[in-house]
Image (tube, coloured by chain):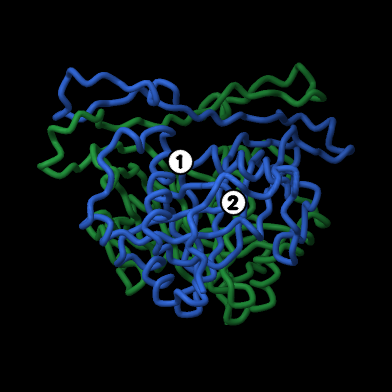
Chain colours: A blue, B green
Amino acid sequence: MQDTAPPTATGPESATPYTPTARTVPTRAKERASYDRELVHSILDAACLCHLGFVRDAAPVVLPTLYGRVGERLYVHGSTGSRPLRNARAAADPGLPVCLTVTHVDALVLARSAFHHSINYRSVVVHGTATTVTDPEERRIALDAIVDQAVPGRSRDARPANTKELAATAVIRLDLDEVSAKVRTGGPNDEPEDLTLPHWTGIVPLTRGYGSPVPAEDLDPAVGVPEYLRAL
Amino acid sequence: MQDTAPPTATGPESATPYTPTARTVPTRAKERASYDRELVHSILDAACLCHLGFVRDAAPVVLPTLYGRVGERLYVHGSTGSRPLRNARAAADPGLPVCLTVTHVDALVLARSAFHHSINYRSVVVHGTATTVTDPEERRIALDAIVDQAVPGRSRDARPANTKELAATAVIRLDLDEVSAKVRTGGPNDEPEDLTLPHWTGIVPLTRGYGSPVPAEDLDPAVGVPEYLRAL
């Protein structure tokens, strides 16, 4: 039977790494792979959008979607009519095989040789079986987590979903069991014989940030920008 | 037989939209979907990293990877030992079913209700069958395109791949046939009865940019930052 108990603060020790499996050990650049729980969490927590893959009619489908992390669980939501959610419900037991990937691009890496061009990045790939969340309390926690993943603290400053909205919202859960991170940092790795070539070499950092919040046209001007937005 | 003819400048008229198919018509938010060729190209050209999905052992796999666009063709490369490339070669005829997705997040959209929280984004989803590129000239064009996708003009200022590097590099091609874009813009769409709620509402733009190029430690100081990097 599906475990729909609400998540608790109690989880695996953060010092315990994820256990590598056949599909979380890369076939190349093995030195970039990590199973460190804190690293995985930090990469996940720095984003709010993932790319969720599933199989439909024997073909892969990859859709961008928001997510939220609560301890060792990831939550994704959507319309009850949307494809992955519908598939997850149709296959509620044993669930929908998915692959959820989160990637940050930190820099372009320009080597002297085209071959050694690369990017600095941080990514997490989660393999597993997504199951539909039916427990009302866990659904509430999940929906808050998805809002707070993008803007920490926001869920407490918004009208919670009402009965009609809840009925239209499917929530699926993916446990962080089969997980790996992959990180590249540093400069180009040129071949020794290329070091005297005349090409510029180095990295171009990519910057990301938040612009000033733009209030909706119909917002009462008396409502100031909340503290949790200033803290972004 | 596989078509490995080099791409040419001749392609479908940019005014001709892609033809919608069962899997490129979304089940929801249909008004956000587009099959406009120029829009699709502009979204693809504003990125260099995609999320590539394929099926392995009946389960989905989604990996971040660099790509390049040449007209109506996308190219992805990798080590000949890497999984998707190996799979594509193993299945060279009829090829490897893939889904290639590119997403830009432009803003966080904060509605008064949790339910109407969203993001402004631009995404492209390409379904199709990836085939291994074997024609040497097309491989050269593809590898240049992947370098130039990240930094336009860079391929002319780097040592091209040598025979050994070419032998270690697999290139796969995905034609832009079954393609859709999805775009959300604008502010929150709150319910009329929520307009008087006291919560801040609006959007928070996400900014992206390039930091100053950081030369490699072993770069001859006489080599200045090239014009194509200043133009980023």
Which quadrant: the N terminus of chain B?
A: bottom right
Visible in this render: residue B187? no
- Crowding at mark 2 (Cα within 10 Å: few <14, some 14-19, many 20+): some
Disc ID at residue A149: 1
Q: How many marks?
A: 2
Visible in this render: residue A109? yes
Closer-to-camera residue (A108/B69): A108
Mark toward the start of the polypeptide (2 vs 1): 2
Q: Which residue is mark 2?
A: A72
* Secondary-structure class at tag 2: loop
Alpha-carbon span between mark 2 and mark 1: 14 Å
Amino acid carrying mark 2 in the image: Glu
Residue A200 drawn above or below residue A64: above
Residue furthest to the left in view is B192
Q: Position of residue B125 (x, y in %)?
A: 42, 59
Residue A71 drawn above or below residue B169: above
Q: Position of residue B209 (x, y in %)?
A: 49, 29
Q: Position of residue A231 (x, y in %)?
A: 44, 22
Q: Chain of mark 2?
A: A
* Secondary-structure class at tag 1: helix
Residue drawn at 40 percent across, 77 percent down: A90
Q: For this view, does B139 lie left or right of residue B45?
A: right
Residue B83 drawn above or below residue A73: below
